[in-house]
Image: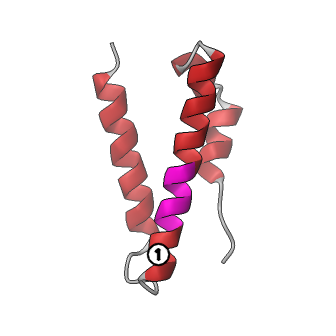
Amino acid sequence: MARDDEALEHYQRNNVLEKACVDPYDRLASTFIEAYLVEALLGLIEKTQNRVKRRDAIACLEQLSALLAATRP
């Protein structure tokens, strides 16, 4: 299955991560968690034989991102 990293590329191109995580350790942790979540959702899609759709996984990541953005000081 081809793995698409458009969201990660968006963050890298627009320096979103650097703006949100000034501390390098926070950036490292954020990158790890983000990659883990993407891999976990792709694994879920594979395990369910595409009953969970890619668009639903993307929506899940977008909702999580919105939730985290809303809780930032």
The residues colored magenta run: 36-42
Q: Residue at x 35, y 32 (%)?
A: 68
Q: Position of residue 10 (x, y in %)?
A: 63, 41
- What element does badge 1 sit on? helix
Looking at the image, residue 60 lies above or below residue 54: above
Estimate how packed mark 1 is, as few (under 14), some (14 to 19) or many (20 or more) residues with alpha carbons within 10 Å: some
Q: Residue at x 38, y 76 (%)?
A: 52
Q: Amino acid at mark 1?
A: Ile
Q: How many marks?
A: 1
* Quadrant holding the C terminus: top left
Q: Quadrant of residue 21?
A: top right
Direction from residue 44 to residue 71 in the image, left or right = left
Chief secondary structure of the magenta span?
A: helix
Q: Position of residue 56 (x, y in %)?
A: 37, 66
Q: Residue at x 38, y 56 (%)?
A: 59
Looking at the image, residue 35 lies above or below residue 52: above
Q: Position of residue 1 (x, y in %)?
A: 66, 78
Direction from residue 14 to residue 45 in the image, left or right = left
Q: Which residue is mark 1?
A: 45
Looking at the image, residue 72 lies above or below residue 29: above
Direction from residue 57 to residue 16 in the image, left or right = right
Looking at the image, residue 38 lies above or below residue 62: below
Q: Position of residue 29 (x, y in %)?
A: 57, 31
Q: Can residue 68 be found in the magenta stretch?
A: no
Q: Residue at x 65, y 62 (%)?
A: 4
